[in-house]
Image: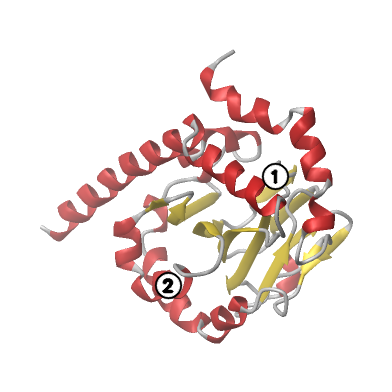
Amino acid sequence: MQKKDWVKTIVNTPAIKKIESLVPKYSRVGDSVFFTTDQFPWAKNLEANWHLIRQELDQVLERVGELPNFQDIMPRQQRISQDDGWKTYYFCAFDFVAKKNCDRCPQTWNLIKDIPGLKVAFFSILSPGKQIPEHRGKHKGIIRYHLGLRVPEPKTSCGIRVDNQIAHWEEGKSLIFDDTFPHSAWNNSNDYRVVLFLDIARPMDFPLSLVNWAAFQILSFSSLAQEAKANYRNWEKRFEAQNSDSSQ
């Protein structure tokens, strides 16, 4: 077995499948396709300060062509995106903090860094016409959060289908869902669609809370996570070098 496959193998074992079947019983936010900000109170603070985040995003977008594609950081995402239509700007991912990116967007980082259970955070940027095919997450211990930051008009031109429900992003509004349900997304507009994308540890009671913690520890030390970290650092070096060249 290749080293890079061991996390996927663990996740797909009967024991893990059995544990995940217990999540609805121990989940503090229930088991549904979408969730509300009342279940995640910190989301209201992000909504109240979304303009601050948008201001920093606008500066990032000035160099959107230099940002890494999703699959450049995580090659396994080539299964759902092979072109340059899905750009990313990372803040953190499983115990790794992209410090220079955070320093460029200090207000955004200050707003998100202490969110309970934060595992992943980045600006998710869909180019005009970008389509993300149906896929699903593999770990029910994660809740997916989107904060609409740049949503072209009409809002119906961009959307996401989770299970059999369709939702549309709104600027300054939260969209919270369980990504283990099959989902797809699209940007049928002529402009960029951008959300603040977070993965949050699902709030759970003991003992599933401990199991979830262990799963995240395994992922943090996995070869997949280490590869993503190395890819990010390589991109950062190139980005910094380009910035240095342009300032001379």
Q: 38 or 203: which is nearer to us?
A: 203
The image quadrant where one finds the C terminus is bottom left
Give the residue at x 76% y 67%: 29
Please, what is the three-letter code of the amino acid marked with disc 1?
A: His
**Residue 245 image point, x, y percent:** 16, 52
Residue kind at label 2, given as amino acid type: Thr
Left/right placement of residue 241 relative to residue 42 reads left
Answer whether residue 138 is visible to the viewer in this image. Answer: yes
Choose top left, top right, bottom left or bottom right for residue 92: bottom left
Comparing marks 2 and 1, which lies closer to the viewer? 1
Q: Which residue is mark 1?
A: 139
Q: Residue at x 44, y 81 (%)?
A: 52
Question: For mark 2, what is the residue?
Answer: 108
Q: What residue is shown at x 59% (from left), y 77% (from top)?
A: 42
Residue 217: image location, x then y, percent: 52, 42
| Observer-nearest of 30 and 80 | 30
